[in-house]
Image: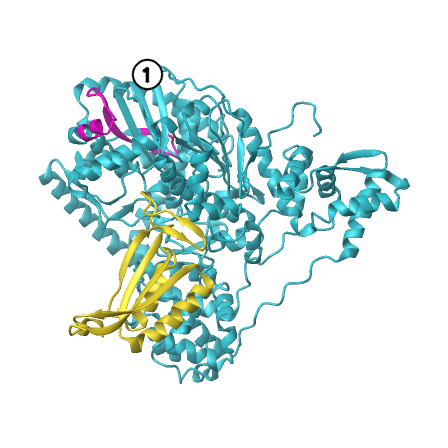
Chain colours: A cyan, B yellow
Amino acid sequence: MSLLLRVAVASAAHDIVPAWPLDSFIAVNPLAGSESLPFEAAQSLGPLTRQRTAYVTDRKRGRILLADLEAAVRLRIPELTGTVTIGDTTLPTARLAALELEHDQSHDTATGPRAPTLSRLDEITSRWVAAYLTPDSLWSMPHRERGLYPAWRTLIRHDSSLARAERHRLLGLPEDPDAGLAWALEQLGVEADDVQRVLARELHQLPGWASHIKWRAEKVGDIDLTSFLAVRFGTRHALQTPPSLDPTPREQSPAAELQRRAELLAGHLVGENVTPADTSAVSRVLAAHPIRDHLFTWQLAYELNYRGRLLSSLSTEHAPAERPEIQVVMCIDPRSEGARRHLETASTIETFGFAGFFGVPIRFVRHSGKGAINSLPALLTPRHTVTEAPHDRATATRRVTAARQRDAVHAALHAGESGTATSFAFAETAGWFYGLTSVLRTFAPGLLARIRERRLADSAIESSVTVADAFTLEERAVLAEASLRMMGMARFGQLVVLVGHGSDSRNNLYQSALDCGACGGNPGAANARAAAVIFNDADVRELLQARGISIPNETVFVAAEHNTVTDAITLLDTHSLPASHRALADDFIRQQIPAADRLVRERARDLPGASPRHSATRLRRRAHDWAEVYPELGLAGNAAMIIGPRELTRGVDLSRRVFLHSYLPELDPDGTGLETILTAPVVVAQWINHQYYFSSINPDLHGAGTKTVHNAIGTIGVITGQGGDLRRGLPWQSVGVGTALLHEPLRLAVIVQAPLDTIGQIISRNQVLRDLFDNEWITITARGRTTDPWMQYTRYGWHTAPLPPAEGAHQ
Amino acid sequence: MNNLTKMTRIEIVVSAREAPAIRDLITSAGATGYTAVSGVSGIGHHGQHSGALLFNEYDTLTMLITVLPPDKAGDLIDAVRAMLHSSSGVMFVADTYVSRPEYFR
């Protein structure tokens, strides 16, 4: 087997982005493989914008202004700076190009591949891969332990879905997957020069499986893309369906098209008296803005409108409030924005934003749990295992034993209800019990939840997390210092609440997508608990003191968790709170309850099927309703990330659309903290933003489709209906309702208050940032001080950021 | 030379995202091992690269070093060169000498 075939497979898979399994759902940019290229160059991988009609509708309702279109044209075509005279009217050339966007309706379609149609080949390949990868299947695939290709090679000769002649063609299959792929390519007559292109096209035929297998090859190792392709091409040979190559892209519009555009626009501006000179002048301008660029200009205008309004809403004041009694640190997740805004109506509370793993990357093992979870950003490899130590070991052992027995009973019942021979008998004998439970779940989900919560509360036992075993004292001090400098915490109240977040819903395969992205798609409680232990550690504080950070003795950190469906915040490990701080903790909870009620009602404005007039209890019942496909909206609407002091945004309603990372340049003189923010939280936010963006723009190819027809492949992922490709991205219920989008697909606008030189240096020494900002996958706008104008970063330097026009200006 | 055996040393610097594919090539070429250094810094064709980042190992550079007998090195060199057509990175190849050749065969 030639290594060059392995190279061809790896190169063909360059654009395939690894897809995490459902139980640790990580949002990714499905086009991340193209981030080293300009955003617009990724068009060959699918539409990158909405259709023109969507932008025109936004233009008519004032969501996009003519000034936005003009600003977008100027940014995209810097040479369009002068004026042009058409008839008796002189107007800026950029406005002329903007006016064309409104009037030329000849190009409505965002082009590029959409979801491929499933063929018989796809159905067969998907069935074999699903059979191989399904965990805990009732009937395990024979020879599975030998790997996908050897197992398939042995079994395919018995596959009755293939005709005898088709099976006969596979008799010569070599034993080894590499040799198998080479053999199949040769049988199909694929030329050596075409191999990489043919393989790449094949991977994009089943992008869901290809993405998951790429992840699995790195993280699990029981399958790889070579085996997948060997099965795929072997089947292709059996079916006698040689691969085809993509056709050559069609030519761009000729000069005649430009003339047509110019005549159309000149006629619109001048009327019947249009002259050849007018048409010629218009033509010279429009030539700089070809039709293929139009949708990108619309998209940029759409984004500039939002960003301009956001920048205008930010405060120019920089006066921190008085020293608060309680400080609350919440995740940068946009959902925290609403919680922080409502909590801050209490004058005694100050809030901060920081990545929800609180700078403590851990692998966490619960005392009662099976296995461990990687509670850290996907950008990191787990190296520190934190365990949970119950205070009463004897009771804990008894309860774990009881829980295991309950698990065994559940497993036996599940086997009974799923078995071919036992399912009917099981339904006859135990169906009445399940029927009763189903009635309760359907008509009284709140009651069932209360019973469940009471049972959990009764069985809960006090425990602590064992941070000292996982991190050395020096490591703890380094993490604590980095966190405090990154979030700009320069003073400390008596109580600092570190609030992780998790989502609570039933019958929801995508629950992990609603948990904390910074914690690897897990709830953030474990990290908050570990961080609180570190910050309360006297030895850590002593080291911090030597590094110039003084945490007063009376300051106590406590962990908490924010339930993003009910908006309740629950304090954790309260047993570790000293008596002196219990009253303050109670005070926090008292203030949090009405804040949560207000937030739940606020969110009800956007939640399908909900109304602000509904009671908070009714709205919270969604967490327990097994028929509810919209328990919450997750991060729908996310559009920007603000890095700076809270004074910038305090009191501003950001509608839960903005990632908020606290930062004070004064605490980070060398910019190390800012570099960490830009290369980690910003990157994670960008992954999330692009996941929502492309799941909205191209839901068939990059989204998972509607939840209502999903079938789970264990915890790996879902398929739509009975077969086909593994679905990637977010389900439609995360981004839309009916046929309308809930999410506005906007590329992330990063807004920073920090010295421009520092930001520029950080970008210039980090390839990931150069790719994202220079290639316009996301934007960064910054100002050094509150009195400075906002400047937008471009690959050619900083330019004044466009802001919304003054009242009365052209709309 | 001092009872040493001549081998070929191959160093490859690629982004951490590309490292798994290169590791796969190294092991497929018959190398008995490799050394990986993550978070390497420097300046190259694509500009400056900062070193290790506190909370991001995914977007840094990784240097992979392997040593193998010269008769096995040719295929790996050809494969890595082809790989670098579709992704950024550099490869350095040099003669080297080892004291325990059986470790590398």
- Work out whether residue A444 can be spotted: no
Displayed quadrant of residue A275: top right
Residue displayed at 36% across by 25% down: A351
Q: Is residue A106 left or right of residue B68?
A: right
Q: Is residue A114 magenta?
A: no
Q: Residue furthest left?
A: A394
Residue displayed at 47% across by 43% down: A689
Q: Chain of mark 1?
A: A
Q: Position of residue A66 (x, y in %)?
A: 69, 34
Q: Is residue A326 left or right of residue A807?
A: left
Residue displayed at 47% across by 27% down: A602
Q: Position of residue A802 (x, y in %)?
A: 60, 32
Q: Quadrant of the N terminus of chain B?
A: bottom left
Displayed quadrant of residue A804: top right
Look at mark 1 in the image and give the residue it sits on: A323
Residues packed near mark 1 inside 10 Å, few (<14), some (14 to 19) or many (20 plus): some
- Work out whether residue A32 can be spotted: yes
User: Between residues B40 and A720, which one lies in front from this camera angle?
Assistant: B40
Displayed quadrant of residue A352: top left
Q: Is residue A417 left or right of residue A625?
A: left
Q: Position of residue B97 (x, y in %)?
A: 22, 70
Above or below — where is A723 with respect to A583? below
Above or below — where is A309 with respect to A191? above
The stretch in magenta equals A542-569
SS assignment at label 1:
loop
| Residue type, numbered disc 1 | Arg
User: Between residues A219 and A119, which one lies in front from this camera angle?
Assistant: A219
